Amino acid sequence: MPLIVMCGFPSSGKTRRAEELKVYFEQTSKLKVHIVGETSLAVDKNSVYNLFCLFCCQVYCLTSHEQSSTWNSSRDATEQYNQDICDALVLRFEAPDSRNRWDSPLFTILQDDTLPFEAISDALFKRKAPPPNQSTQSQPLSSANFLYELDKITQDVLMAIFNSQKTSVPGDLIAVPGATEKISFSENGMCVNMAELRKLRRQFISYTKMHPTDKTGQISNMFVQYLNKSLH
């Protein structure tokens, strides 16, 4: 469901522009257009956020404070804003900025401008969806399963290293369960204690939680590669 957000000072022409858009879309397509005003529907913060997650654009009716006040005073008395309220709303209004991702695409309309109907239509119906990113992609596995596998596999690798160090000599390659790559210790004869290994494991787990893989069979190899880089 495409959404057009109208914004601007009080009495800046938002309703008139919304009506123009409604007429355009209903005449050029079979779409049913609904105009939702601030008094026609009660929405909570979650609903507002969900609306902004839709394909949408903003139309900014740009006027001066003086012009808005003049238009406000010419409205029917029952529809006018109290001047103090009008001034307060103007002071609190935060103008949209097309450089902000959440304000784009933005169409700024002056008093005598003609609405760019085709450009607005293209922004709603021909815009490509943004590429998936970490915040929009689902984890390959359920969170509980992924964390369980991550914890178990890395713990098994640590125990294999700890047990192998008892019989290994500098330069030996240590095989670990589930990994094709091997742990290589430097030839300085220094064994890595469990405290250091646990620290590296915690770091690896923290990183992997933020960059989950859909192939749990690769976790062992990834952890071994991480250890080899960190230990040398």
Image (spheres, grey):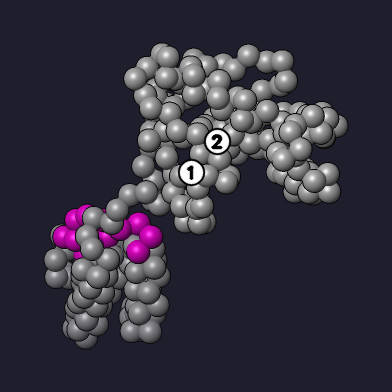
Which x, y percent locates residue 177?
14, 70
Task: Look at discs 1 and 2 and give the one toward the viewer.
Answer: 2
Q: Is residue 213 inside the magenta stretch?
A: yes
Q: Residue at x 56, y 40 (%)?
A: 37
Q: Amino acid at mark 2?
A: Val
Q: Residues within 10 Å of mark 1 (few under 14, many from 20)?
A: some
Q: Secondary structure at mark 1?
A: helix
Q: Secondary structure at mark 2?
A: strand
The magenta segment: 209-222
Q: Residue at x 14, y 66 (%)?
A: 178
Q: Amino acid at mark 1?
A: Phe
User: For this view, does 30 lie left or right of residue 217?
Assistant: right
Q: Is residue 187 above or below residue 1?
A: below
**CA distance separating discs 1 and 2:** 9 Å
Which x, y percent locates residue 40?
52, 44
Q: Is residue 13 above or below residue 38?
A: above
For the stretch drawn in magenta, the main secondary structure is helix
Query: Is residue 172 shown to the viewer in this render?
Result: no
Q: Which residue is mark 2?
A: 5
For the C terminus, give its image quadrant. bottom left
Q: Is residue 187 inside the magenta stretch?
A: no
For the N terminus, give its image quadrant. top left
The answer to which image quadrant residue 54 occupies is: top left
The answer to which image quadrant residue 7 occupies is: top right
Q: Which residue is mark 1?
A: 52
Picture mark count? 2
Q: Nearer the viewer, residue 129 or 198?
A: 129
Q: Are marks 1 and 2 in contact (CB under 8 Å)?
A: yes
Q: Residue at x 50, y 53 (%)?
A: 43
Q: Nearer the viewer, residue 195 or 113?
A: 113
